[in-house]
Image (spheres, rainbow, N blue to C red):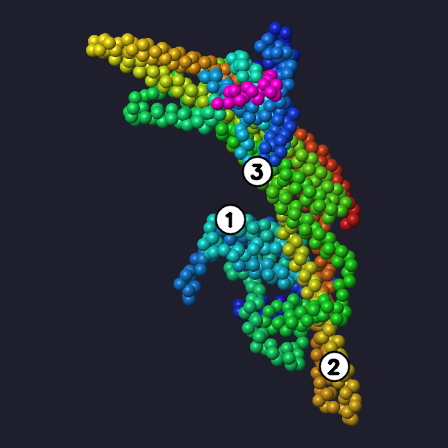
Amino acid sequence: MSPSADQEDDEDGFLGAQSGPEPDPRVSDSSKEVPISRNGGNSSQEFLTMAVTQPQKIQESTGSSLVPNIYVTYLVVSHTNIPEYGGTEFSVRRRFRDFVTLADRLALAYRGYFIPPRPDKSIVESQVMQKQEFIEQRRVALEKYLSRLAAHPVLRKSEELRLFLQTNGKLPLQPSIDMASRMLDGAAKLPKQLFGDSSTVLAPQEASQPAKGGRDLIRIFKELRQSVTNDWGASKPPVVEEDKEFLEKKEKLQDLELELTEASQQAEALIKAQQEVGDVVGDLGLALIRIGKYESQEATGNAQKVHATDVKRLATAAVKVSRFYKEFNAESCKHLDHLHDYLGLMQSVHTAFSDRSSALLTLQTLMTDLSAMHARIEKLNASSSKTFGGDRSSNRKVEELNDSIKTAEKSRDKAQEEYERIKERNRSEIENYECDRQRDFFSMLKGFVQTQVTYNERIASVWSKAFEEAGSASV
Amino acid sequence: AGIPSSPNSPAPEQPFLSISVTDPVKLGNNVQAYISYRVSTKTNMQEYRGLEKIVIRRYSDFVWLHERLTERYKGIIIPPLPEKSAVEKFRFSAEFIEVRRRALDVFLNRIAAHPILRQSDDLKSFLQADEDSWVVEKSRTAEGVFKKKPSDFMQIFKDVQSKVTDVVLGKEKPLEETSEEYEKVKHYVTELEDHLGEAQKQSYRLVKRHSELGQALAEFGKSVKSLGGCETGLLGKAFGELGNRAELLSYKLQKQAQDLLMNFEEPLKEYVRTVQSIKAVLSDRAQAFRQQRELFEASKLKEINLEKLRVVRPDKVGEAEIDYRETKLQSDEANRRYEEIVKVMQQEMVRFQEEKTRDLGAVFHEFARGQAQLANDTAEAWKVLASQLDAWSHQSAGKAVESSA
């Protein structure tokens, strides 16, 4: 976060007294970052587990409104042996809004990584929000989200997550800047900046951050202009995404996403169809129970008594089979869930790739700015050389421009750093993703197939027993 | 015993009558199109001319036979026919035709297996009459044939039931049997209808769900194969094999659905229809009872009148006496008819229960076997893949370790 920009909003001073253009410690030199290997290193010995439990409804009355504000908090309990945490067990109360804040902060600080997506905000009435079922669904989703964060070797050690899990009381992370509110802020300065000399050069600290709302409107417009320029090919952008390997991988991932979507849908349909077979077998069993009872009552001869017993036996078998189907489906679901999970992860991949694009765009915009400034200086020098003795106002302008250029060059460098950093993160994430996916999909296939074997064998033996034990009446 | 569906060679002394319904052929055009069936009879019964005979019959011919038997053989549970098709476009689907063909085959063979019904002359005509004589035969008997529709039977049965209520409410003199045996039979039939109907409903759903699972499995297999196309190396292979396996099993499931339709649902349906036949017999019995009752009352009345007349109007006695004797004869006849129906019905119920026990026992037994087979085959098919996957995933993990080293 750029401290100077945010201190106005930083009411509670949570981010501490950072001042001046000191580099944010989390946005470190790319040279310091070590590529992550999931399969080796000490990361495999570390663990971090969380449980989200005990939802509680909190009612607080705000001074102004008559309607009390009701929201739900969850108890988040964590266990870990990660040294950075300085402890083994923590327990805090958090509300959904806190999770959103956590997610937003991670998104800002860890651009380029495949950051697991958080559970959706639901656009439902507050009444629904309080229903038990909804709360339970949300609790499960939040727990899943945290466990995915914990599985990421970089994110699990992030300060954001640590603060989230450890700090009792109010979450010491600032919510992300609301775009809308900042729009008004920057709008007042807008006309001058757009039409007059743009004396606002992008500060270096900001160069390494994506454009946000408010004052960044200018930057957004500039970058938009740049991207349009890029798209229309009017001028070749100074830095082009030339990493062929990256582009290939990106395309492959896009294909994968399409197929995953389809497979995920079909998997769901399969489970449902399996469930329906199980249900109807159960219903048949119930019908057979009644027939068996009836046949028992009406039985006159021995043949009929035997038949009645056979029917009852078959009924029992059918009911047993339908119970097996319930377990069968739960197990199958568990395995096929990997498809849904990896499909969900695609969102993170998109975000990480677009982080890369926007970092590149920032860099390109700055480079364009720089060349524009250089061109201005040349023009000024050329025109002032025609004036005998030099033009004092012209000289002043050149001086100003040179200063601006120095700042702009620093910004460009920072933007370059950030872009390289994100590129490297993309690369290592892709590698890990491939690895994880191979492993998880193999495990999914094995698990799914094994479940099919196990349960079909069980079901076969139930039916076989009923068949073999049937009395002589059936021969 | 059971349902003889194919001709077999019996011991020479045993009379046998074996019928098969085969080769459905679409004849006629457009609106008047219909299906004709080949009916082949093999018999050594003397009443039949020759050992073998083949004729061509259509559904309405079977209906004719069913109606004739129902008219002639009161008290006997006439084997049921498959329904007329409700949906026009469905009439010529392969599945519908096959289901109907089987049901017609069962129909004729049940008649052939029945000691009394197999003697029917109408059956003989049906099985033997050539084209021309067949047309003559049908028009001769046309008047009585389509008189009573199945729905009429049901109405009578409903009347019968409501009459019981009336008695209970003390509304009118009972024209309904109230014997314990009668009540028992009615109760038995109602319960049976209920249970068989439920079983048949579930069997229909079972068939459908098996078929749907087959479809879902095929779609899943397809999508998994496509997904495998995005993956390289062993994982891609694994997805491909999974897809293949799924498609194979999908085919097995569709076959199983077919089997269940023919060997589980259809027999249950046939028994549900048979229960309707039993209800028809009950309603015949109720009707015979009412007739007998009415004629008895009438005859009694006439007897009393006759005695009165002897005293008051001796000149009218002659006529009255003739009238009375006629009525008495009719009353006795009606009583005999009624008692005959009761006797036959009782025998029929015993026969029915034995057959039902045998047939449904076999159906349920086969059902369990089929389900066990399907589950076993499925487990086996997946097992092969399971060991392949194990091997591949080890190889793949090994490669990953190599490349990261």
Q: Residue A149 appears at what percent x and percent y?
A: 62, 53
Label 1 neighbour load within 10 Å: few <14, some 14-19, many 20+: some
- Name which residue lies at 62% across and 72% down: A217
Tag 3 or tag 1, which sits nearer the N-term?
1
The single residue placed furthest to the front in the displayed view is B315
Q: Is residue B26 above or below residue A65?
A: above
Magenta residue span: B127-143
Q: Which residue is mark 1?
A: A136
On screen, residue B289 versus residue A86, left or right, reads left
Q: Residue B263 appears at what percent x and percent y?
A: 59, 26
Marks 1 and 3 in Cβ contact (< 8 Å)? no
Q: Nearer the viewer, mark 1 or mark 2?
A: 2
Marks 3 and 2 in Cβ contact (< 8 Å)? no
Q: Secondary structure at mark 2?
A: helix
Q: Are marks 3 and 2 on the same chain?
A: yes
Q: Secondary structure at mark 3?
A: helix
- Name which residue lies at 63% across and 11% down: B50
Q: Which residue is mark 2?
A: A376
* C-alpha separation, residue under disc 3 versus residue under disc 2: 72 Å
Q: Which residue is mark 3?
A: A275
